[in-house]
Amino acid sequence: MLASLGVAALTGILAVLGGNSEILGRLALSGLWFGIGLAVALAASRWLKKESTQRAALLSIALVSLAVVIAFGATWAEMFGLGWRATSRLAGTAALVFFAGQAAAIAFAFSANATMRFASRVVLVCIPVGCLPMLLLIWDLLPGWPNENRLAGSAALCWGAMPPLFACLAGFPGRVWHWRWVGIGAVAVGWPLAFYGIWNDFNEPPTVFLECIIIAITVSLANIAQFPVLPGKWYRLRLVSVISVLVSAGFFSYINLLTNIWKRQTFNDEPLIALKFAGVFAIVGVAGVASLYIVERLTRRPSGVRVAELTGITALHVTCPRCQKAQDAPIGSSRCQGCGVVLTVGVSEPRCPQCEYALLDIVGDRCPECGLDLPRRGEVMKLPSKE
């Protein structure tokens, strides 16, 4: 990061001091690349504070540094007689390394969460698979417009499958929702169909492929709607959101399976009405799912703050382990009323040992935030570190 800052400052100084317009432009552009790399590296350095995300931070910094070096080479390639083709190929490679690298780093960061680990690993496989056809396209290894379109479509297909796969697999294997596999199955069926269509120049998407997209998106939204922990009667918002998503999917399926609206030139009949209803319910469903996470964030109790029910507790009814005398012992240290042994008692809000999520009144033996297995009630629980 210090090297990037130094290079960015140096190129800016050289650009100010002088030179012809071409040199000035390349110096300014080089300073811009190093400045962008520095900004991303500084943002990623925040992950270094946690041991669970250190690998993600190192991956992000390493790949953004590589992207900056390649972009620097693209900026000065023509000055060394490499030509505009080399410049465009290096620039495309730099952009690919930058965006794919940061996506991989984010997936690594998500893998620190137990509920997202498996889904993140699937995404980490999809990212390089999508990069392969893009590299073939950038470096013109399969020349010709048909092949270029096919390579671009294949890359888009691989990367487009990542969001529904991640959303459907979130929570696996800790949370057993068998219906999630409907969405995974839809992706498994739709992906080879789309790949076959891309490489055989199909102009219209097949009905089965579109239905697979509808099912995969529906299941993914329904799955991620299950994670926010909502207080009181806010659970009804989850119900309304999921129902809206399902109704929207029903309308889209009706349009896809029972009409030919995708092939029609005019839209003045009943399919258009169904399409409008599908859009309305889709907006309500997506907005509802997003609002679940907002409500959870706004109503979550901050770490380290004792709740009112616990602050009002001043004593506990205990039995002395030495003389077996039952008594009300005050919070803190006090002497037994029977034998005089010192009793130390206290109460605190239960929190996850890994992420310190508030667990008071949470039902179950798994943290809803990070998925960590928790001891059952009545068993010894490890408290979060105060360091």
Image (cartoon, rainbow, N blue to C red):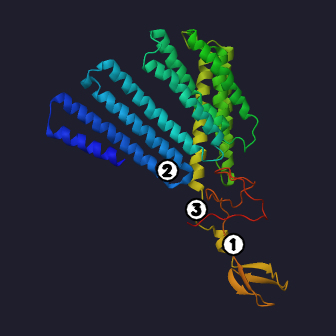
Q: Identify the amino acid type marked 3.
A: Ser
Would residue 102 be visible to someone looking at this image? yes
Q: Which residue is mark 1?
A: 347
Instruction: Name the residue at the right extreme.
Output: 324
**Residue at image coords 56%, 23%:** 157
Query: Splitting the image into 4 quarters, where does residue 8 fall?
Result: top left
* Residue 69, quarter of picture: top left
Is the Cβ of the residue at disc 2 closer than 8 Å to that at disc 1?
no
Question: Vertically, is 339 above or below 40?
Answer: below
Q: Which mark is residue 4?
A: none
User: Residue tagged by mark 3?
Assistant: 303
The type of residue carrying mark 1 is Val
Q: Position of residue 310 (x, y in %)?
A: 67, 71
Would you identify the image quadrant in which residue 265 lies? top right
Q: Distance between the Cα atoms at labels 3 and 2?
A: 19 Å
Q: In whole angstroms, how far apart are the C-alphas of marks 2 and 1?
A: 33 Å
The residue that appears at 33% across and 46% down in the rendered structure is 3
Q: Residue at x 75, y 54 (%)?
A: 365
Question: 259 left or right of 24?
Answer: right
All told, the count of numbered labels is 3
Q: Is residue 255 visible?
A: no
Residue 274: image location, x then y, percent: 63, 22
In terms of depth relative to the viewer, which is nearer, 12 or 210?
12
190 relative to 297, above or below: above
Q: Which residue is mark 2?
A: 47
Q: Earlier in the sequence, mark 3 or mark 2?
A: 2
Q: Residue at x 59, y 34 (%)?
A: 123
Looking at the image, is mark 3 or mark 2 nearer the viewer?
2
Give the percent coordinates (x, y) of residue 53.
54, 49
Instruction: Point out residue 351 in the picture as x, y percentages from the top left corner.
Output: 65, 61
Dot 1 falls on a residue whose secondary structure is loop
